[in-house]
Amino acid sequence: MFQQSLSARFRAIEQLQAIRARHTPGTPRYEDVEHAIDLALHDGRVIDGYIVRNVLRDAERIRTRRQAKHPTRSLDDDTEDGENSSPADSIRFQDHTTPEALAIANDLARALLRSVPGNRLVVEHTLAGLIAGETAAETAKACGVGVGYVEKVRMGIKVTARELFACVGLQ
């Protein structure tokens, strides 16, 4: 029984890899198939004749829910600036229409990154994850730290944001 489900899982992953090969990296469909492969690898996934269809559907639903939750927010993960750049420079706000609004958003990100205690890289990734709509588990996996630590950093970011907004009378 175990051997049959294992071979069915491998066949499903091979089919998903073939589908992925037909799409351009960075497109929503490519990302859906990438996520579907991760879903198919999960031990709790039911292996049946519909696994490929089900994981593709689930991956698409997850993406669309995230987009609905954060329709105008985006994170540019591909920026690799030198050591002299500010950590907030890697966070990109694309929902601002004016240069002034963009400057305010970037200043807020820099203030949060300066004020929150913890490992600078983890704090930066956690803030970027919050903006991108990631879960604490996704951010923790990307940073290579525990979920509890990411949740602690998230709480620090939220407390600091409340304090900053209270100082300027926005709370």
Image (cartoon, helix red, strand yellow):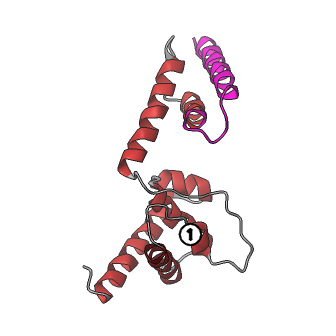
**Does any portion of residue 45 appear in the rendered image?**
no
**Does any portion of residue 9 appear in the rendered image?**
yes
Range covered by the magenta-colored residues: 1-30
Q: Badge 1: few (under 14), some or many (20 or more) residues near its Cα, within 10 Å?
A: many
Q: Residue 160 in the image: x percent, y percent?
A: 39, 79
Q: Residue 24 in the image: x percent, y percent?
A: 67, 35
Q: Is residue 18 magenta?
A: yes
Q: Residue 22 in the image: x percent, y percent?
A: 68, 25
Q: Is residue 49 left or right of residue 80?
A: left
- Farthest residue in the front direction? 98
Q: Is residue 94 magenta?
A: no
Residue 156 in the image: above or below residue 139: below
- Farthest residue in the bottom direction? 167
Of 134 and 79, nearer the camera is 79
Query: Measuring 27% from the left and 80% from the top, which residue is drawn there?
Result: 170
Query: Measuring 51% from the left and 80% from the top, which residue is drawn there?
Result: 117
Residue 115 in the image: above or below residue 56: below
As shown in the figure, which amino acid type bears the numbered disc 1?
Glu
- Farthest residue in the right direction? 82
Q: Write down the residue under mark 1.
A: 124
Residue 79 in the image: above or below residue 12: below
Q: Residue 169 in the image: x percent, y percent?
A: 26, 86
Q: Is residue 136 left or right of residue 83?
A: left
Where does the C terminus fall, quadrant-wise? bottom left
Where does the N terminus fall, quadrant-wise? top right
Query: Measuring 59% from the left and 58% from the top, which residue is drawn there?
Result: 76
Exactly how many numbered labels are in the figure? Answer: 1
Q: Main SS type for the magenta part?
A: helix
Query: Measuring 45% from the left and 57% from the top, which residue is drawn there?
Result: 73
- Callout 1: helix, strand or loop? helix
Residue 91 in the image: above or below residue 53: below
